[in-house]
Image (spheres, rainbow, N blue to C red):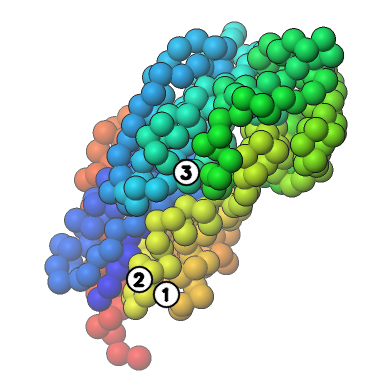
């Protein structure tokens, strides 16, 4: 029996690889001779960097960069085991979680630190990048990233714009003369699960601005600034980003990555599952076990378990999911290819207790699942 174990990490608990190993322990108690293939997975959000590094036997690297308010912090990036691909999670440098509630300021927060992570990867010799852009604290259209990479954004008097989204209202032209030449031939793939345009009622400022601290007045200000930015980018670079799907992701960072680095935006789960080699792992598999911290209605929107189930389903391979919790609507995942879903919680316990004992709980529920599978294999049709 060949079993592919491809979970996502449980936020605040274990990484995807740690979870896969715990599930493997339970499987082996029932089927000690089973072939188990561990495929740490993710969907472009939290845990993507770790999953890609673990799946490729890569390394986690660190760099001192600017946080969303320009303060120095230590952030991590991933060097995949292929020796060619770097992984960047913009949230590690420009993310919402880096700021206290009273520090949220989308008029002035910047993606400059995300650009510095690119530079760290370039310095290490990487020319292929996978970028996760969820969880941003910024609304600057990727202007900060551009500035960190040697692109000058200037006002009508030729002065460099200050960092932050509000400053884009005064952009007059883009000066590429000092652009880091190492970036001219890079391949950038962006894990992006939203299709919002850059501007307008469905754009970056209106949809995502409020969670970053934007007031109704500042939303209008930021939207107008991004609109001006789009006009100048199209005029000077010949790249139209205003209406492109995904341009509004991460406060317009999607637009900036497309405009300045010719990035390709794609569904996060597909990028990750391709990168970790899931399709190869599924060859001749008899069963897939996947999972995430919470399986509920939102899981059907191309989250990791459903992305895996769709690929397994094309090969007729059944999929079982294990979750930290089963929320409202989790049954909807059955229609997406997940045959059954289990929670790892075996009895009354607090969240802290469950997190502390996740490894043992996973092994336990995996063992019980496989005991049930053994019964099914012994029944006569």
Q: Which element type, helix, strand or loop, lies under badge 3? A: loop
Q: Which element type, helix, strand or loop, lies under badge 2? A: strand
Q: Residue at x 25, y 76 (%)?
A: 1
Position in image of residue 220 (x %, y %): 84, 21
Image mark for residue 287: 2
Foreground residue among 199 and 146: 146
The answer to whether marks 2 and 1 mark residues whose Cβ atoms lie closer than 8 Å is: yes
3D distance between C-alphas at marks 1 and 3: 36 Å
Image mark for residue 198: none
Q: Which residue is mark 3?
A: 127
Q: Is residue 60 shown to the viewer in this render? A: yes
Q: Which residue is mark 1?
A: 317
3D distance between C-alphas at marks 2 and 1: 6 Å
Foreground residue among 166 and 195: 166
N-term mark: 1 or 3: 3
Foreground residue among 11 and 55: 55
């Amino acid at each position: 029996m060949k079993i592919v174990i491809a979970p996502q990490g449980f936020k605040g608990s274990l990484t995807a690889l740690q979870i896969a190993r715990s599930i493997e322990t339970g499987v082996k108690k029932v089927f000690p001779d089973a072939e188990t293939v561990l495929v740490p997975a993710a969907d472009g959000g939290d845990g993507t960097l770790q999953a890609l590094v673990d799946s490729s036997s890569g390394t986690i690297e660190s760099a001192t960069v600017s946080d969303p308010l320009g303060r120095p912090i230590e952030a991590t990036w991933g060097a995949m085991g292929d020796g060619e691909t770097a992984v960047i999670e913009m949230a590690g440098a420009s993310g919402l979680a880096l700021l206290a509630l009273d520090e949220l300021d989308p008029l002035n927060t910047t993606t400059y630190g995300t650009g510095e992570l690119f530079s760290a990867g370039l310095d290490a010799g990487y020319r292929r990048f996978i970028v996760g852009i969820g969880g941003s604290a910024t609304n600057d259209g990727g202007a900060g990233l551009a500035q960190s990479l040697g692109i000058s954004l200037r006002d009508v008097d030729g002065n460099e714009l200050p960092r932050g989204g509000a400053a884009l209202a005064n952009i007059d032209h883009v000066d590429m003369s000092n652009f880091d030449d190492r970036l001219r031939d890079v391949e950038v793939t962006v894990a992006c699960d939203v299709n919002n345009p850059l501007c307008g009622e469905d754009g970056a400022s209106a949809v995502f601005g409020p969670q970053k601290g934007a007031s109704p007045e500042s939303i209008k200000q930021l939207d107008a600034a991004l609109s001006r930015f789009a006009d100048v980018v199209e005029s000077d670079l010949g790249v139209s980003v205003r209406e492109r799907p995904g341009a509004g992701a991460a406060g317009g960072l999607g637009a900036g990555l497309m405009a300045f680095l010719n990035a390709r935006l794609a569904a996060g789960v597909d990028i990750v599952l391709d990168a970790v080699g899931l399709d190869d792992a599924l060859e001749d598999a008899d069963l897939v076990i996947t999972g995430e911290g919470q399986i509920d209605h939102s899981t059907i929107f191309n989250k990791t378990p459903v992305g895996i189930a769709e690929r397994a389903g094309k090969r007729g391979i059944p999929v079982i999911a294990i979750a930290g919790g089963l929320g409202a609507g989790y049954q909807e995942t059955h229609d997406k290819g997940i045959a059954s879903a289990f929670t790892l919680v075996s009895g009354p316990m607090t969240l802290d207790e469950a997190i502390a004992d996740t490894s043992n709980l996973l092994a336990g529920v995996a063992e019980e699942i496989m005991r049930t599978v053994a019964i099914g294999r012994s029944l006569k049709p």
